[in-house]
Amino acid sequence: MSTFLGMPSLPVFGTGNLHAAESFPTAAHRELGNAQLRANLGHATHTIRDKRLQVVSELPDWEQLRDAGSAIKESVMARLPELLEQFEQNFTARGGVVHWARDAEEANEIVAGLIRDTGETEVVKVKSMATQEIGLNEYLEEQGITAFETDLAELIVQLDHDKPSHILVPAIHKNRTEIRDIFLREMPGADPALTDNPAVLAMAARAHLRRKFLTAKVAVSGANFALADSGTLAVVESEGNGRMCLTLPETLITVMGVEKLLPTWQDLEVFMQLLPRSSTGERMNPYTSLWTGVTDGDGPQNVHLVLLDNGRSAALADEMGRSALHCIRCSACMNVCPVYERTGGHAYGSTYPGPIGAILSPLLTGIESEENSSLPYASSLCGACYDACPVKINIPDILVHLRSVDVDSKRGKKKLPSQMDVGMKAASWALSSGKRLGLVEKGLPLGRLAAGPDHKITKLPGIAAGWTQSRDIPAPPQKSFRDWWAKEHQSPETGGTNAPARDKGQANAQADAHHNAQDKEDGA
Amino acid sequence: MRIALFATCIVDAMYPRTAQATVSILERLGHEVVFPSGQACCGQMHVNSGYLKEAVPVVANHVHAFDTEDYDVAVAPSGSCVASVKHQHPMVARSCGDTALEARAAAVGARTYELSELLVDVLGVTDAGAQLGSYFPHRVTYHPSCHGMRLLRLGDRQARLLRSVRGIELAELPEADQCCGFGGTFSMKNADVSSAMLEDKTANIRSTGAALCTGGDASCLMHIGGGLSRQGSDVTTLHLAEILASTAEAPASVTGEVRVATGKATR
């Protein structure tokens, strides 16, 4: 007999490391003060940016590839339930086991349970965003299970008990001297004579990791792609550590967001061109590992996949925001972002920093979660991210959309309207009529008065103080263009504002004359 | 051609000479300029700050002002405001379920041009010196604003026009394609990050040795000029319309306080 428990309440928002604990401006203020961080980031992002541009310009069909990537992802989102079931069927038929996790807690419990079943207390890990999103390492630690990151940069961050600040280059905020110090302090058996030479540091990490690979019985990974028509999973990486984790242990547990699906093998062709060029600026990544269930006598014999929702269904339900799920985690958007370049990834709080994080985090958690409502404002809307995105996610439009979701979510809930609320309401009144704006502009001479003899305004109160912290405002003109035009073109007979057709020569002379007259009036 | 000028609110209120220069250029080319008097603002400040509801009357006002006037094309001396008219207005109308307004907004957007776009693509200006008499004997650097560059795909239209001004010395701006950090209310809500971006932009501008920085958007120029002023720099900002309108007989003033005081401006 079955018991009807009712429909689950929708939407189920994401949990785990998706939250900004403090508002973006507060966090950014702190991070901006770190000169070392800004120098590292500036150098690193510019280097990757140039490399990306170089390899992208080699492909004459780059724009068509972007279109194809976007279209494939759009079709995946449109028929996600069907494709997920197709994938599960194929993966299961080849000996894999699929688990479904609604949120971070469920996913963590499933993974911990699977590890416990093996009797092991240590696991090696392939670099994975999904497991960071759910806070798997921390959860496993509470359960008495130690997870070893094997990606070099992830290892550095983990040894330092820090958080990644970039999804592709997690230790982008650390320099080599800092890394040497971390190794000496935290890596068991590190040579006390260790130098900060990058090759020496890499060899030290290699020796440390090799011991782990050869003893680990269980590995945990994420996945870049899952192919529905064959039940295949794919991991794309640079170092080969992933390949070790995916092939040596007896048990392999993969945690993957449901949006990573691709319909067919052939679709991989598009993404294998888009991803390496967009992420590391390489024509091809060094290691691509693909596995389809269990292969007898070769590789892991217990293969599991945890399919993670964690707010993805909620994001999918947002018509304007859903294309954020097209993201293939290449990090091109953060490498070109002028905001990310200066604040670094920690300012965004969530596992997903930069422009994509500013939309993805609030979409997954809901706009009202902790300080995530501050994230969509962390952009000047310059649009560099949209141009760089290999799957053409219109990040600026989604940022603007989420700002309106934020403003609307707060309407009627505040005891007092904010300065911004009041200002926007007043501006809406003044700017929705030429007459009213004209009336407001009659006050320009007051602004001139405020500017004083220096002809500039250097200090403003309230939220406008943000402007004058680094910028002056020029003294306004004596009168608006509107007033000038009316004076010059008002015809008393018709009452219209437009000049009757005049001969060209006269018009030129008039416009030029008034251009100069205004110069004189303004005291130039 | 009968050309409707959309002055934009910031130029109307703060930089009237930019609009006067626009009028002057178009009239020199033999066109008639009209100024739809109901116009006020494109509303992108509201849209980009999340106040979609408050943007609706602003957008409706603009659409009304520009579809009740008789003209061939509309022009604004701003890439950002034109991008808003073209891309945001139909979206705002859609958001409030007004399909009639959406259609009218799309029609207005379709015949609204950014100044350099109109000059190059429609009016066939290839040589500002020869066709407009533009003369501006100063060392100038040029910041291509993001919305013109990425939303309107203006490419090198503005730079080409500037290069064809007689007497001008155009100094290449390092990292020109990087945002200046203005971003509307971003400059106040995230003032620290905005200021950090501005700092790098002004450092690049100063490194060119130019006397002034020009561009196609008064808002970015107000931000850049305000920063230069605060830093005590002598470098000023000037909208490219004023450079194009400048002639040997009636040269544009480059020291006016409206562009931002340098502390050394002659008054």
Image: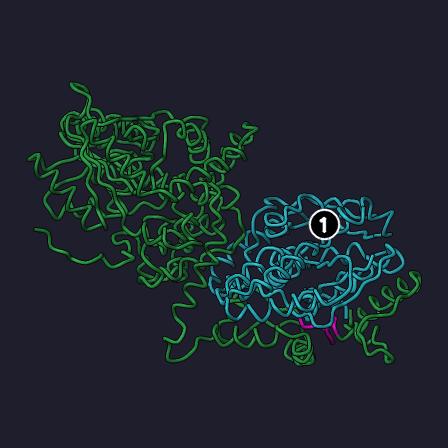
Image chain in cyan: B
Q: Chain of mark 1?
A: B
Q: Report crowding for label 1: few under 14, some 14 to 19, many 20 or more residues within 10 A (C-alpha).
A: many
Name the spot of residue A484 as percent of width and height, x first: 78, 73
In the rendering, at what x and y percent does residue A122 appear?
13, 36
Q: Which chain is green?
A: A
Does A110 sit above or below residue A506?
above
- Identify the residue at horizontal 71%, vertical 63% (top origin): B6
Q: Nearer the viewer, residue B72 or B75?
A: B72
Tell me what residue is drawn at x 41 percent, y 30 percent: A267
Q: Does residue A386 show up magenta in the picture? A: no
Instruction: Please identify the quadrant where the C terminus of chain A is shown.
Output: bottom right
Secondary structure mostly taken by the magenta-highlighted segment of the chain: loop
> Can you identify the residue that label 1 sits on?
B117
Residue A234 lies, in percent from the top left, at 31, 30
The stretch in magenta equals: A475-482
Q: Position of residue B5 (x, y in %)?
A: 75, 63
Amino acid carrying label 1: it is: Glu
In the rendered structure, the answer to whether residue A155 lies left or right of residue A419 reads: left
**Residue drawn at the location 78% of the way across and 61% of the way down:** B71
Q: Quadrant of residue A478?
A: bottom right
